[in-house]
Image (cartoon, helix red, strand yellow):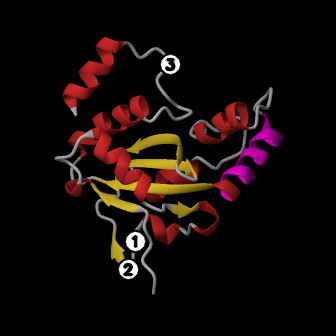
Amino acid sequence: MTKDDYLIEYSDIETGSIQSLIDRLDQINGKDLNELRVQDLSYHNGEPIWPGQGVYIFRKGKRILYVGKVSSMSFTERISKHFDFRSFAWMNTLLKLISKKELEHETQDHDSLKRASRYAFENLNLILINFETRDRINRTERLLRSCARPLNKFKNLTEKNFEKLLCEY
């Protein structure tokens, strides 16, 4: 049995720098979305992912496309919501960003979101960072969104705010 390489425990990286986290993300394979099962969001190599909340990263190859967080529900509940291709769905930001920025669709309607969904399943992989406690989830997600420059990067990040994020980390 080969081990899946898509989960990082925050306790293993908490003393490192943001650069060491980005380097670690570069070295990890991720879970191809076309192979992802619901069970993979609850169990990793047969062991429960507990408590199953933290930061998740969608990548195309090694390029980080989206950084999200989950602290009020579990990975199992949150990840699937990204793939709802109804245009009125409110938690499918990943598809809307892929449609607009990767596929350059002019509108994000049902059809363009279906194409974005297909694109995601054919091209993206997933990495989970599991946190035992919630206190560092927001900071880690904000810092990764600032440093990794995903599609959902901060629009008006000032140097002052960036320095504050670095200090919080």
Q: Position of residue 36 (x, y in %)?
A: 56, 66
At x 75% / y 37%, what residue is drawn? 103
Q: Is residue 82 left or right of residue 154?
A: right
Identify residue for label 2: 46
Amino acid, disc 2: Gly
Q: Is residue 43 left or right of residue 36?
A: left
Q: Is residue 54 above or below residue 162?
A: below
Labels 1 and 3: the sequence-earlier one: 1
| Residue at (66, 48) in percent of width and height | 84
Calculate the distance from the C-alpha at mark 1 to the C-alpha at mark 2: 6 Å
Cα separation, mark 1 vs mark 3, equals 35 Å
Which residue in the structure is indicated by mark 1?
Answer: 43
**Residue behind mark 3:** 155
Q: Bounds of the magenta span? A: 109-121
Check disc 3 and report its element: helix, strand or loop.
Answer: loop
Q: Marks 3 and 2, how far apart in space? A: 39 Å
Q: Position of residue 128 (x, y in %)?
A: 41, 55
Residue 112 left/right relative to 1: right
Identity of the residue furthest to the left in this view? 15
